[in-house]
Amino acid sequence: MYRGGESMKPFKRQEKRLMILMFVVAAVMLLSFLRRLFA
C-alpha cells in the first residue's frame, strides 16, 4: 500500500505527460479502426 502524500508528488508531475500519451494512443486506435471500416 502506498502512503498518500509522498507517493502522489512524482505522479502529479508526470500526470500531464500521461494524459497526452493516453490521448495519442486513443487517437491512433480510433484512426486505425476508422481506416479498417472505410477500407
Image: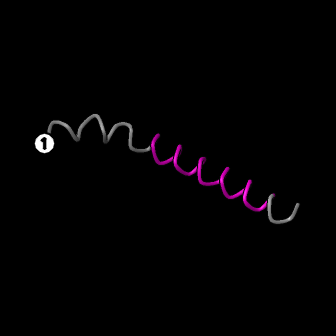
Q: Which quadrant of the rendered structure holds the C terminus? A: bottom right
- Report the residue at 52% width, 46% height from top: 20
Task: Please report the residue visible at 59 percent of the width from the left and 48 percent of the height from the top.
Answer: 25
Asked if the stretch drawn in magenta spans residue 22, the answer is yes
Please tell me which residue is depicted at 77% across the width and 62% down the height of the picture.
Answer: 34
Question: Where residue 5 appears, x then y in whole percent?
Answer: 14, 42
Query: Which of the two residues, 29 or 18, is positioned nearer the viewer here?
Result: 29
The question of residue 3 being in magenta is answered with no
28 lies left or right of 4 = right
Q: Secondary structure at mark 1?
A: loop
Q: Is residue 22 above or below residue 36?
A: above
In this view of the protein, which residue sits in the foreground, 34 or 13?
Answer: 34
Start and end of the magenta stretch? 17-35
Up-down: is 34 above or below 16? below
Q: Position of residue 24 (x, y in %)?
A: 60, 47
The residue under the point 22% across, 41% down is: 8
Residue 4 at what x, y percent from top left? 13, 45
- Read off the residue under disc 1: 1
Q: Is residue 5 left or right of residue 22?
A: left
Kind of residue at disc 1: Met
Image coordinates for residue 23, horizontal then vertical, percent? 56, 51
